Each structure stands twice: as structure tokens, then as C-alpha cells.
Image: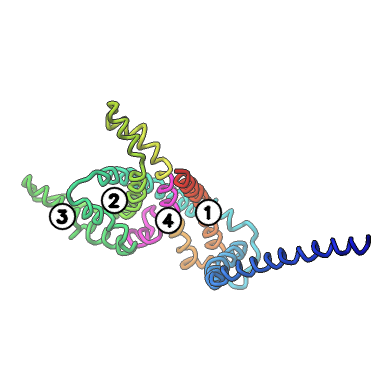
């Protein structure tokens, strides 16, 4: 019995070796596939994560480069200052107002342009290229275009148009409004809307071209008006694309620095939180307070990005289910 039992148990004992060897080979192949990505992962950690960890540590410190002997642990004092200081609190409100207004205006205008480009007409490709062009302009260059070529009081295009219109009515003293001083926040909003509308248009145009056209054609054959088709079919289909465009736009616009710095230098109530961080760090030399404000921006961006990723995943699932 002992010998027979031993003979029976040996094959079972040897049968486990191939499975262990196969698992080892699978792990080795998995690491072999991941190995080329390790340098990029290390580089990403060094460039993004380590600076953020350092910024997080500094945000809990009372550190002013003009008073290095007073450097020490501050706890949550810097974060309380960010939320209670009048200037920083106003910067947070300006950031919210700037982000919401730019995202909503860009979505509405982008939706209108996407509906137009979804129609077939001569020169549609050229029109699409021209409408996309503002998004391809470097942000600083776009702000300079608006500051000098469009909004300048002496040689700007808008004042030139006003002068021409007034000359048609025989007026010798046409108005020369200074938009950057009279409506500075509106000037920043308009420049950002001009730059981000093509981005929204592209996302919504992709959503329009993914509509189930058989449903639309059936509704039209049943006598549905264009407004009814848009309200009951097109708009519900575009809901997730509108959410995606709004969330992605908010992630970038909440961090905008170029337009505020170039157009107004943060003056006249246009300083958003990124510009306030710049002032706090480089002019006030308050490294701890600036780091705390930067962490607040990152937290807000992560919250928005989380909703954006959920929307993206839901779109992927919807496309995969077709």
C-alpha cells in the first residue's frame, strides 16, 4: 500500500511543477513587456510627483526667503490664510468666475459651430481648418494678438472698426474705448473663449458624427421639426460630450496664467489663483503660502479631472456596447 501510494502521489507531485514554471514564465514575460516603460515611469515620477511632494511639504512651513531665520513648521496656517486672506479669496472667486464663464460660452458657441460644420456645404474643409486655427496658437501669442492687434486703443482692430462706423455718420470724434482698463475681466474672458471654442467644437462635432442617423431619419419621416430632432435626439446624445468638453476645458482654464499675465498683469480685479500664486512666490517671497495655494489648485483640478475620467470611461463603454 505504501509503495502504491507513493507511486500514485509522485505523478501529482510532478504535475504541479509545470504550472509553477508556467506562472513564472508568465511573470517574466509580463515584466519583460513592462520593462521598456520603466524609464518613462521613473522620469514621470521624478518630474511630476517628487516636486508635488516637496510642494506639499513646503505648504506646511512658514518660509519667507526674506526672513530665513523664522522658517519653521506652520501646520494648517497657510491653508487657512489661503481661504481667509481677502486677496487670495478674491483670486479664488475670480478663478471660478473666469472658468465658468469661459467654459459655458465656449460650449454654446462651439455647439453652434459644430451644428453648422455637420452640414454639407462647399468649402467645409477650409472652414473647419480656419475655425480650428485659434486653438493651435500658442497661449501667450494669442494673448498678445488680443492685447495689441485687437484691443489696443490706438491701432487696434476693434477701435478701427468703431472709427470707420462713426465716420459713416459724419462724426469727427469717434469713441476710443480702452477695453483692457474699462472691462479687463471681460477682455480676458473673450480672449479665452476665442481660443477654447475650437476645442469644444471638435468634441461636439465628433459627438454629432457619431449619432445614429437611422433614428434621426425616422423622426424626420414622421414629421418631426428640426427643433424637435435637436431637443429630443441630438441634445441627449451630446450630453456626455458636453460634459466631457466642459470638464476638460475647466481643467485647463482653472490653471490659466498666460492670458491674465499678458493682458492685464493681474490688475483691476483680474488676478486669478495661478497669478496670485505667482505674485505670492516671486514678489512676496512667501514660499509656504504660495505652495499651499498651489496645492489648493491641484486638489480642485484633481476633483474636476475625476469627473472627466468618469465621463470618458462612460463614453468608451457606450461605444464598445455598439
Tell me which segment is drawn in magenta: 243-270
Inspect the magenta stretch and tell me whether residue 263 lies in it: yes
Question: In terms of depth relative to the viewer, which is nearer, 125 or 162?
Answer: 125
Q: Residue at x 45, y 63 (%)?
A: 278
Judge the density around disc 4: few (<14), some (14-19), many (≥20) Cα neighbours within 10 Å.
few
The image position of residue 125, as x and y in percent, is 23, 54
Q: Is residue 29 left or right of residue 112?
A: right
Tell me which numbered mark, 2 or 3, is placed earlier along the sequence: 3
Q: Earlier in the sequence, mark 4 or mark 3?
A: 3
Query: Which comes before the other along the chain, label 1 or label 2?
Result: 2
Provide the residue designation for mark 1: 302
Q: CA distance from mark 2 to mark 4?
A: 26 Å
Question: Dot 2 surroundings within 10 Å: few (below 14), some, or many (20 or more)?
Answer: few
Q: Main secondary structure of the magenta part?
A: helix
- How far, Cα to Cα, is label 4 from label 3? 33 Å
Disc 4 versus disc 1: distance between alpha carbons? 11 Å
Per the rendering, the mark at residue 160 is 3
Q: Nearer the viewer, mark 1 or mark 2?
A: 1
**Mark 3 vs mark 1, CA separation in Å:** 44 Å
Residue carrying label 2? 182
Contact between labelled residues 3 and 2, with CB atoms less than 8 Å apart: no
* Left/right of residue 266 with respect to residue 124 in the rendered view: right
Amino acid at each position: 500500500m505504501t509503495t502504491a501510494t507513493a507511486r500514485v502521489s509522485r505523478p501529482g507531485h510532478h504535475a504541479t511543477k509545470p504550472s509553477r514554471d508556467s506562472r513564472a514564465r508568465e511573470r517574466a514575460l509580463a515584466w519583460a513587456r513592462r520593462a521598456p516603460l520603466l524609464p518613462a515611469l521613473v522620469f514621470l515620477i521624478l518630474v511630476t510627483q517628487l516636486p508635488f511632494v516637496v510642494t506639499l511639504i513646503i505648504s506646511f512651513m512658514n518660509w519667507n526667503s526674506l526672513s530665513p531665520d523664522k522658517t519653521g513648521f506652520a501646520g494648517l496656517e497657510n491653508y487657512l490664510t489661503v481661504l481667509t486672506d481677502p486677496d487670495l479669496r478674491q483670486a479664488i472667486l475670480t478663478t471660478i468666475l473666469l472658468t465658468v464663464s469661459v467654459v459655458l460660452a465656449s460650449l454654446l458657441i462651439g455647439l453652434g459651430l459644430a451644428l453648422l460644420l455637420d452640414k454639407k456645404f462647399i468649402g467645409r474643409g477650409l472652414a473647419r481648418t480656419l475655425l480650428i486655427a485659434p486653438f493651435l496658437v500658442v497661449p501667450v501669442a494669442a494673448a498678445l494678438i488680443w492685447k495689441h492687434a485687437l484691443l489696443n486703443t490706438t491701432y487696434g482692430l476693434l477701435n478701427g472698426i468703431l472709427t470707420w462706423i462713426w465716420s459713416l455718420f459724419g462724426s469727427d470724434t469717434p469713441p476710443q474705448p480702452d477695453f483692457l482698463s474699462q472691462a479687463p475681466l471681460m477682455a480676458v474672458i473673450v480672449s479665452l473663449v476665442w481660443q477654447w471654442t475650437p476645442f469644444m467644437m471638435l468634441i461636439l462635432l465628433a459627438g454629432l458624427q457619431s449619432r445614429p442617423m437611422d433614428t434621426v431619419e425616422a423622426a424626420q419621416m414622421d414629421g418631426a421639426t428640426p427643433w424637435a430632432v435637436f431637443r429630443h435626439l441630438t441634445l441627449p446624445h451630446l450630453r456626455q460630450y458636453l460634459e466631457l468638453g466642459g470638464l476638460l476645458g475647466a481643467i485647463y482654464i482653472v490653471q490659466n496664467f498666460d492670458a491674465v499675465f499678458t493682458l492685464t498683469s493681474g490688475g483691476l480685479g483680474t488676478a486669478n489663483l495661478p497669478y496670485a500664486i505667482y505674485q505670492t512666490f516671486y514678489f512676496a517671497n512667501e514660499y509656504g503660502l504660495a505652495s499651499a495655494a498651489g496645492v489648493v489648485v491641484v486638489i480642485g483640478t484633481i476633483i474636476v479631472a475625476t469627473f472627466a475620467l468618469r465621463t470618458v470611461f462612460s463614453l468608451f463603454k457606450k461605444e464598445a456596447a455598439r
